[in-house]
Amino acid sequence: MSGEAEADPPAQGRQVPDRIRVVVADDHPMWRDAVARDLADAGFEVVATADDGRAALARTRATVPDVLVLDLNLPALSGPEVCSALAAAGVDTRILILSASGDQQDVLDAVKAGALGYLVKSARREEFVAAVHATAAGEPVFTAGLAGLVLGEFRRPRSGNGADDRVIPELTDRETEVLKYVATGMGYKEIAGLLFLSHRTVQNHVQNIFGKLHLRNRVELARFALERGLDLADPAS
C-alpha cells in the first residue's frame, strides 16, 4: 500500500471532503454489512449498499459517492463491468476493488476497467480503512505484492515492427519522465526528491500532462500508460 496519499492538482482533481461518502457492493450479506459497519465506525458516511453489479451501478450513479468499495465477482455485472460502465457514464467516483482473489489477471482487468486500487479481503481492518482514505484522495492502493504485478504489466514491451510507439509528442521530455513516475503510483514529494524539483513544480508538470492528454486524474493517467506500453521509470535502477 502506498504510504503517501496525495490528491491530484486542484484544477484537475477534487478536494477530499471532511466526511467521505462511500457505497459498498458485495453479494455476501454478512461481509457487506461488516464492511459497511467498519466504515461507519471509522467515520465514513455509507450512503448505499448493493448486492449485485446492476444495483452497484445504479446506486453509484444515483448518489455519486467519493468511493465505491466493489467486490470483483458480482451477479448481473462483474466488478470490471461496473467500472467500465461508470467510466462511460462519466461518474466521478473512485473505485477500490475488495476481492478474495489475488489473481494477476483479475487485478489487471480491474485496473484496465478503471479501478484505482485493489485490496484482498484478507487485509487487516486498519489497512482497509487506510485504503479507502487513500482512494478518496486519488492515490492508487494495492495489497502488498499486487502493485508489482501491475507495474510488471506496465513494463511489458509491446511487439511491433521496431518503431518506438512509446513517444508522446504532446509532452516535453520532463513531462514524459514525470508521467512515468506518477503512473507507478509514486507521490509528488517522492518524485520531486528523485528529480531534484520542488513539490509545486511536479504538481505543475502533472497538471500540464492532464491538460495536454485530456485526462482528469491519476487513474486515467495510469490507464494511458498501460495502453501505450510505456517503459515506466524504476526508481531503484
Image (tube, helix red, strand yellow):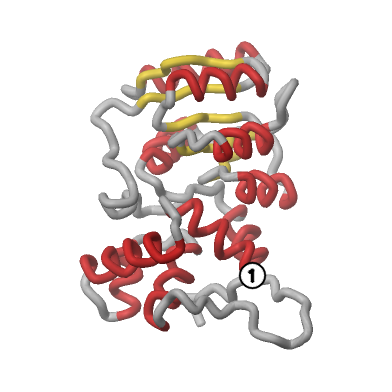
- Residue 220 rendering spot, x and y as whole percentages: 50, 53
- Identify residue type, mark 1: Gly
Vertical relation: 222 (above or below) 48:
below
Q: Is residue 8 left or right of residue 54?
A: left
Q: Quadrant of residue 177?
A: bottom left
The residue drawn where x is 33% and y is 47% is 13
The residue drawn where x is 47% and y is 50% is 140
Vertical relation: 128 (above or below) 182:
above
The residue drawn where x is 41% and y is 49% is 139
Q: Quick one: 193 or 13, which is closer to the camera?
A: 13
Q: Is residue 13 left or right of residue 217?
A: left
- Residue 188 rendering spot, x and y as whole percentages: 32, 63
Q: Is residue 31 visible?
A: no
Disc 1 packing (10 Å; few <14; some 14–19; many ≥20): some
Vertical relation: 152 (above or below) 66:
below
Looking at this rendering, what residue extends furthest in the bottom direction? 162
The residue drawn where x is 64% and y is 34% is 99
Q: Quick one: 171 or 19, which is closer to the camera?
A: 171
Residue hosting label 1: 229
Q: Quadrant of residue 33?
A: top right
- Residue 211 rendering spot, x and y as whole percentages: 37, 61
Vertical relation: 228 (above or below) 177:
above
Q: Secondary structure at mark 1?
A: loop
Q: Is residue 163 left or right of residue 195?
A: right
